[in-house]
Amino acid sequence: MTRADDAHPFAPQPKRPIPEIEGTIGLMVEVASSNFAGTLTAITQREVTLVDRRGRERHFPRTEGAFIVNERRVTLMASPVATVSARQPTTTASGSVRISHQAKTARPSRIYVEGVHDAALIEQVWGDDLRAAAIVVEPLHGIDDLASHVLAFGATPKRRLAVLLDHLTLGTKESRLKATINDPNVLIVGHDFVDIFAAVKPERLGVTHWPDVPRDEDYKQGLATRLGYANATELFHAVIRAVRTWTDFDQSLIKSVEAALDFVTLADREP
């Protein structure tokens, strides 16, 4: 005889309620039904407006559970303040819409760069974007073992890896290393210059061009010597002081960093 308070093993489970959160201007939002993600710039009782890092604006119906915030499916609620569009949002150093965001647990996807100088310069410009997306940039301290690093990472559709290389042009060592990687969950991108220092526009340091350095010299030290700096560290500090926004970089670096960010932040999500 079954007691009334015994749960039937095949009884339907109660549906877990979807949390409701206030849709505040500047909130980072992902759309549950697509790969689109951006900052919230307007919300009404019927519609949510998002703008992504490239400035593309899209409108989505404000329906139950239609959005993802901090990796949780939520229902966005309109507030009296949020019904007014953010008409002139401030921008980050990378040209993205500046948003307020809380600390997040880092996503499993990563961006690898060759060394600490690469990581520091990318942080200088794209740091706000990286924190908003919860993506970590890690220096490899050399790329001769690139295939081993990629294999050890173990990329999957939900754990993507982007690698940013210096001097990724036809016939270089970097291009040959890239050819050894054949994984749809790994993206290898790069810029045209021997070192990321030279991807900074030279006029930012008060010179018309970056000097040529013979191949048998250390490139950074060679630049420092020819530009009048005591050593590569002193030159690095000068470069960091000179870089303020994405406009201080050559287009080949900008495009590669943006491609890497898009690749790792649009990793497939579980339904």
Image: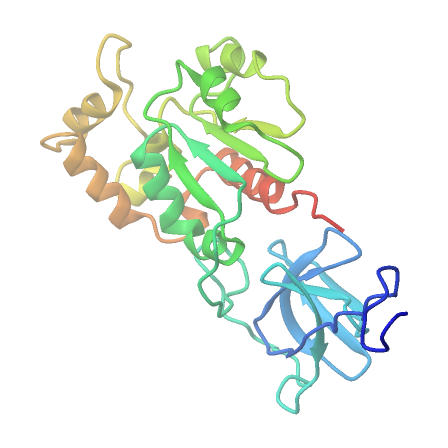
**Residue 43, position in %: x, y?**
71, 79
Q: Is residue 228 left or right of residue 21?
A: left
Q: Is residue 52 above or below residue 21?
A: above
The quadrant of the picture occupied by the N terminus is bottom right
Q: Is residue 119 left or right of residue 147?
A: left
Q: Is residue 255 above or below residue 43?
A: above
Extreme residue toward the bottom, this view: 80
**Residue 170, position in %: x, y?**
54, 12
Q: Residue at x 27, y 24 (%)?
A: 211
Q: Is residue 70 above or below residue 169?
A: below
**Residue 226, position in %: x, y?**
17, 25
Q: Residue at x 54, y 16 (%)?
A: 178
Q: Quadrant of residue 255?
A: top right
Q: Quadrant of residue 62?
A: bottom right
Extreme residue toward the front, this view: 1
Q: Is residue 63 left or right of residue 95?
A: right
Extreme residue toward the left, this view: 230
The residue nearer to you, when weighing 35 against 165, is: 35
**Residue 77, position in %: x, y?**
70, 81
Q: How many marks?
A: 0
Q: Is residue 205 above or below residue 35?
A: above
Q: Residue at x 50, y 53 (%)?
A: 134
The scheme the figure's colours follow is rainbow
The residue nearer to you, when weighing 17 against 101, is: 17
